[in-house]
Amino acid sequence: MAAVVRTRLSRGIMGRLRLASQGLLGPGFRTAPDAVRWMTAMQAQDLQAALWAVGQRVPGSGVEDVRSALDRGEIVRSWPMRGTLHLLAPEDLKWVLAITSDRLIRGMAGRHRELEIADEDVQAARKAALQLVSGGEAATRGRLFRAFEEAGRPTAGQRGIHLLGILCQRGWLVQGPLSGNQQQVVALDEWIRESRTLDRAEGIAELLLRYMRSHGPATERDFSWWSGIPLTEVRAALAEVRDQLVELVFEDTGYWLSPGTAALLDDGVPGQRSVLALPGFDEFLLGYTDRSLVLPPQHADKIVPGGNGMFKKTIVAGGAVIGTWARSGNGRGAAVVPEPFDAVNGLRPAAQKSFELQAAKYRRFVGS
């Protein structure tokens, strides 16, 4: 039976527990693949943001360390959940897709009808793609789309990206080595040599357990939204793994996390004075359906202006989002500029100094 912790909690403590679970407090991870494997799946629709999300969790790393891991296939990037690109460990991709892809593709059926994408289009695109990349070859997205066109399958009006998404969700293609700032497409079975196989119930239970360990404290609804798995199956999986987790009750809601993270409550959760410069789309904010635990609702539109789906880079202090930041200029003269929510008082002196250290860390990471 899972331990239930009823202790004096605050939103700041809950946020710092999440930072600790995600490797953003403490020693972090030794390598980029270690960080991605622990996180299970990391938001990666913005590639540059995803590289920094990994870098923040791997002390001393540089952007080339993460890029090289992608080039070697130690990290892969695909559309496993919510129609959104994520980074995963290669051995995890197939079994996660086996759980999520059918429901995801069914959910896109209306959009596919609007785009006039039928099964014969998918099969023709699959044949053209595999002819192009089989035998260890890789193709840019532009070259792949030309192959679709040559097979009589138009790519205009988002047809191309949706065909590519389906081929990746079905486990035929995956994004592989980088060409500049664009990933090339490769055949999944050739790029990923070893894959795990889990049945659906076993896979959902593992995915849930790993999510709670790497994202907790989180709710079953957070996981259901994050994974796209229905709550009925989530609750059945939770019954299987709850004895490996701890439940925190905060504001009459049950949150789940690992025993190791919960143990931080015994001596005081670290990070009260921590300041982090996180990328846009980081799992710390986007990994949950309810973000109000760490982001005051009155500031939500400052993270996603106009609700346009583009998340700004965030400043996180003491476990809460307190502002955004931006990079100004290019090269060695580039500046990292804080934009706190409190525009009148700005950052306090100690927070400003900590932010400057984060800015220096970011510049070292990107090599500017």
Image (cartoon, rainbow, N blue to C red):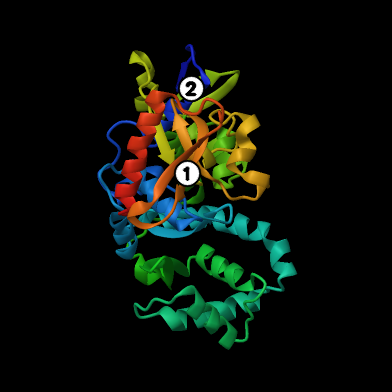
Q: Amino acid at mark 2?
A: Gly
Q: Is residue 214 left or right of residue 281?
A: left
Residue of label 2? 12
Residue 231 shows in this picture: no
Please report the residue visible at 55 percent of the width from the left and 23 percent of the height from the top: 254
Depth check, front residue: 184 or 114? 184
Q: Which mark is residue 94?
A: none
Q: For the point 51% across and 77% down, which residue is it?
A: 142
Q: In screen coordinates, is 160 left or right of 44? A: right
Task: For the N terminus, give its image quadrant.
Answer: top left
Instruction: Give amino acid for label 1.
Output: Asp
Q: Quadrant of residue 357?
A: top left
Nearest to the observer: residue 13 or residue 352: 352
Q: Nearer the viewer, residue 124 or 14?
A: 14
Q: Position of residue 275 (x, y in %)?
A: 40, 31
> Mark 2: which secondary structure?
helix
Residue assigned mark 1: 282
Residue in the image at 56% along x and 31% along y: 343
SS at mark 1 in the image: loop
